[in-house]
Image (cartoon, rainbow, N blue to C red):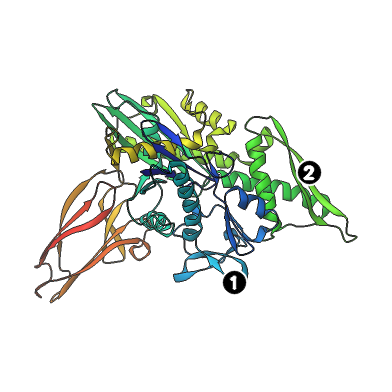
Amino acid sequence: MLLGLDLGATNTVAYLWDGKLRPVETTEGGATSMPSVICIANGVALVGQPAVEAGRTHPDFDFRNFKRKMGERWHDDEDTGYQTCEGENGMLAFRGPDGATYSPVELSSFVIGEMVHAANDFLAPHDTVTGLVIGVPATFTPDQIEAVKEAARLAGITENVYTLEEPVAAAIAYNIDAKKARCSLVCDFGGNTLDISLLRSGEGLIRIIAKNGIGDLGGADFDKRIADYAVNLFRTETKKDLQLRDAAMTRILVEAEQVKKRLTDAEETTFRVENIDRTAEGVSLHMIYKIDRRILSELTRDLQERVLTACKAAIEDAKRKDPKFTQADIQDLLLVGGMTRVPAVRQLVSDFFGKQPKRDENPEQVVAQGLAIKAAIIEGRKPDVTVADITSFEIALETRGNVPAIIIAKGSPFPLQKSFKLRNADDDQAELSVRLMFANRPRASDCHVLEARDIPIEPGPAETREVVLVVQVDSEGHPSILEVAA
């Protein structure tokens, strides 16, 4: 059976479909979500809640939020954190004990493997996991998507690995009626990323008309603000400076996340981390501070504004394709992801759109539910839900002057095929170099190259030799060169 797996930055959730949605209970007391945390302790890689517990005594090797680092090159700067280093091929890696290093792909494979193990226990003895449908943010690049698939392969799932954008999975889970004419906005705000998607339904089809997002905005950033607030108070009280690279920061960030969660239901709570340091005389120092919703809102006001910026950008994208489109056309607000539990975030979105959003009781599980439904569709156990998706990036060809020439605009419906005519720029050229890329940087040399080919041509005067290039974007949104004719 295919498993729908939401590989989250903070928690991972999996669902199965066999006539009805069933959450996979982890090996941690029947919980339906597993912390995306790895701790290397005494030579063993612990996963989930055991890793959280072990991290209290092994904070140097407690790894979190590694999903955001998928496909990222290493830079020696303060923001990367004290645990990171340069791995293979210049990619970011995490420092482990005894000089070992772990890539974000490897750490993610531990999480996937643990959830697959739990699902197999859940299905035994009548069935087993034969493949995965894994959710990916709409902002993920092809490198990051391939990294997710590689993590699944390292976890032992070598075949039948599919990916689906998380906002699309959310739309499926919310059971948007494809026959009913509606316009919906999906705000998927998780631990590490924010995705905004606009959808139109009607005539048996769900069409994504615009999407935008922020790949480096999530619950982890809210946690960091709370942690910084506590560290600043501690510095003021004790004149001691706890730096980001200190191992103590792991304990502080764990408590910051718990404070954020407690403030979803309570107006006020206590930030408490004991024995964080000692005085010169050996007296233990503690961090014990009152934090309320007002303080949290003030600390994260600019982060909240970035949510609205992404919403506005999605609306502007929709307007460019349909000048008659207005914000008033949006009839439904669908909230997905654990961060939509935060009252300030819900209020922010509600005030901006002037209507109450729809939110599942467990918003962090909605994507996994949609992924499980998609898995059932792939296996033919459920009628298909037709979703017409659009490209998340501009697709370009490299031109002279190191400039990417856009050939397929962002927001183009796929699958699609387009033909282009290219000519030789110089006299007596023997081949034409074609580089297909995502235009995610101003300079072509900095863009993500999808495919590169050198096409032999008959030498002759400039602009006299013609090449016909056919580019396709397949049903999964993957662009490629389909055909070249000289």
In percent of width and height, residue 106 lies at: 48, 60
Residue 396 in which image quadrant: bottom left
State the image coordinates of residue 155 (x, y, percent, origin top left).
44, 57
* Depicted 468 relative to depicted 130: above or below: below
Q: Nearer the viewer, residue 362 or 307?
A: 362
Residue 99's disc is 1
The answer to whether any part of residue 113 appears in the image is: yes
Q: Quadrant of the C terminus?
A: bottom left
In the rendered image, residue 66, in percent from the top left (x then y), is placed at 52, 55
Where disc 2 sits, the SS reads: strand
Q: Residues within 10 Å of mark 2 (few under 14, many from 20)?
A: some
Q: How many C-alpha atoms fall within 10 Å of the one at disc 1: few (<14), some, or many (≥20)?
A: few
- Picture residue at 88% right of the left edge, 59% below the top: 282
* Residue 363 appears left or right of 479: right
Q: Earlier in the sequence, mark 2 or mark 1?
A: 1
- Say if residue 298 shows up in the picture: no
The kind of secondary structure element at disc 1 is helix
Q: What residue is at 63 percent from the left and 37 percent from the top?
A: 261
Q: Position of residue 303 (x, y in %)?
A: 56, 42
- All told, the count of numbered labels is 2
Check disc 2 and give the amino acid type: Ile
Q: Which mark is residue 263?
A: none
The disc labelled 1 sits on which kind of residue?
Gly
Left or right of residue 172, residue 355 in this image = right
Q: Which residue is mark 2?
A: 288
In the picture, measured across the screen, residue 410 lies left or right of residue 138, that is left
Between residue 336 and residue 160, name the one nearer to us: 160
Please determine whether, in this image, residue 39 is positioned above or below residue 321: below
**Cα separation between marks 2 and 1:** 35 Å
